[in-house]
Amino acid sequence: MWRSKKKKPNLHARDLDQVLGDFEQDRFLLEWTDHILREARGKYPILADAFDTPQSADKHAEGPVLEDHLRKMLMALYALVEGRFSLSDIEEFARMRGYEGEFEELEETIKERAAFFKAFCIVHDIGKAATISFSAPLGSRGAEEGFGNGFAAAWDDFQGD
């Protein structure tokens, strides 16, 4: 436990969205992450299918498809590993007084196990493509084109029934 170890608060900490926004502007991180995702798409067709899975804006604001979500995760992981930011730079963590040591330890663990977290980022939503479902109001164009199936229909397709 690190709670007895007190440190000065990071007065320059910023909101998580601001920190993540910086990564999106970082050309190196963007190119590196795109390379990783292209490589994964090429090697594993099941990942390519998953990466193209649509995401709803109300639940996943990262972008219209799963690949956008994965890109942000990988960019944040490697920005942390490369020392471009620290967990204490994030306001939501910085305001938790007395836990600075735990965040430092967590950061070191993430850096030491970067390969595991990279793999986790890439595959953690691999099942989304198989279970996606759509709903469309009766009489709408979406319903006419078959977008009225619910989750149960997607699950039945996945089961091979």
Image (spheres, rainbow, N blue to C red):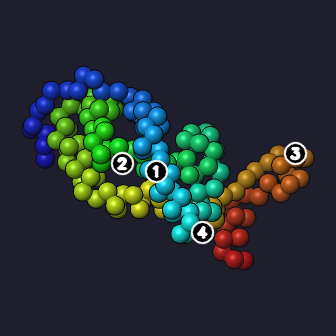
The answer for how far apart the CA atoms under marks 3 and 1 are is 39 Å
Q: Earlier in the sequence, mark 3 or mark 4?
A: 4
Residue type marked 3: Ser
**Label ID, residue 33:** 1
Residue 67, how many percent across, how many down? Answer: 56, 52
Image point 71% across, 70% down: which residue?
Answer: 157
Image point 80% across, 48% down: which residue?
Answer: 136
**Label ID, residue 78:** 2
Residue type marked 4: Pro
Circle 2/circle 1 CB separation < 8 Å: yes
Residue type marked 1: Thr
Residue type marked 2: Tyr
Residue 28, how many percent across, how many down? Answer: 42, 43
The quadrant of the rendering that contains the C terminus is bottom right
**Label ID, residue 140:** 3
Q: Is residue 115 above or below residue 18?
A: below
